[in-house]
Image: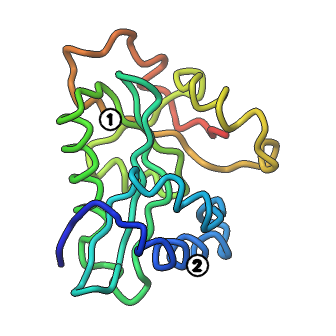
C-alpha cells in the first residue's frame, strides 16, 4: 500500500468510500464536488491504482486542524490502514507547524489508541462556529470530540476540561 496526497482523479473513489460510511450514519455525507474542491486536503492509501482508504486534514488556521472523512474500504478493514492514515495526518500537521489536531467521531476508542484524548466540546469553538451551528444533526448528534497535541510548545490555550468524560460535539 502506498500513502500519498489525493489527486483529482481519486475523487470518485474517495466519494464512494465516504458515501458508504455516510449511508450507515458513521460519516457526514460529502458531495463529489465538495471533495473535488478540497482534494488538496485528502491523503489516500492506494493498492496499485485503487484507493482503499482516505482521510481529510482540514486546517482551522496555523494552530488547529481537523481530521474528517476517514474511511477504509470494508474489504481492507482490520489491517491497520486507519492507524497509518492518522499517523500520516499527524506527521503532515507537524510538518505544517499545526499544534493540535482534532476529530469528531463515533469511534473515540480508535482515536485514543492513536494518542488522542477526549476533549470538551467547548474547547473546539472553531468547529462549533464553522460546522456545528448549522448542522442538521446538531440536536441528535452522538459524535465525540477527540484531540491530539502535535507540537506542545505551540499550544496557545490549554484544552478545556481535558480530563472530562467524552462530550458530544456537533
Residue at x-position 42% and y-position 67%: 8
10 Å crowding of disc 1: few (<14), some (14-19), many (20+): many
Q: Position of residue 129 (x, y in %)?
A: 67, 26
Q: Position of residue 15 (x, y in %)?
A: 54, 73
Nearer to me, 3 or 162: 3
Nearer to me, 168 or 37: 37
* Direction from residue 51 to residue 12 in the image, left or right: right
* Direction from residue 117 to residue 96 in the image, left or right: left
SS for callout 2: helix
- Above or below — where is 123 with respect to 134? above
- Above or below — where is 40 with respect to 117? below
* Direction from residue 42 to residue 99 in the image, left or right: left
Residue at x-position 28% and y-position 85%: 49
Determine the image quadrant of residue 2: bottom left
Nearer to me, 167 or 129: 129
Residue at x-position 62% and y-position 38%: 169
Determine the image quadrant of residue 146: top left
* Direction from residue 92 to residue 125 in the image, left or right: right
Q: Position of residue 27 (x, y in %)?
A: 59, 62
Seen as rendered, the residue at the extreme top is 156
Figure quadrant of the N terminus: bottom left
Reading the chain from its start, which is encountered first: label 2 or label 1? Answer: 2
Identify the residue position indicated by label 2 in the image: 20
Identify the residue position indicated by label 1 in the image: 148
Disc 2 to disc 1: CB gap under 8 Å: no
SS for callout 1: strand
Amino acid at each position: 500500500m502506498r500513502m500519498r496526497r489525493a489527486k483529482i482523479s481519486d475523487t470518485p473513489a474517495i466519494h464512494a468510500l465516504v458515501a458508504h460510511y455516510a449511508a450507515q450514519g458513521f460519516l457526514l455525507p460529502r458531495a463529489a464536488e465538495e471533495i473535488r474542491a478540497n482534494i488538496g486536503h485528502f491523503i489516500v492509501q492506494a493498492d496499485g491504482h485503487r484507493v482503499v482508504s482516505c482521510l481529510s486534514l482540514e486546517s482551522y488556521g496555523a494552530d488547529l486542524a481537523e481530521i474528517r472523512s476517514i474511511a477504509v474500504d470494508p474489504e481492507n478493514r482490520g489491517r491497520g490502514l486507519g492507524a497509518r492514515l492518522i499517523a500520516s495526518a499527524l506527521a503532515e500537521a507537524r510538518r505544517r507547524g499545526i499544534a493540535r489536531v482534532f476529530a469528531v467521531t463515533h469511534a473515540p476508542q480508535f482515536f485514543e489508541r492513536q494518542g488522542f484524548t477526549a476533549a470538551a466540546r467547548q474547547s473546539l469553538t472553531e468547529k462549533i462556529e464553522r460546522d456545528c451551528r448549522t448542522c442538521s444533526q446538531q440536536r441528535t448528534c452522538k459524535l465525540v470530540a477527540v484531540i491530539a497535541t502535535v507540537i506542545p510548545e505551540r499550544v496557545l490555550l490549554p484544552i478545556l476540561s481535558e480530563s472530562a468524560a467524552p462530550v458530544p460535539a456537533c
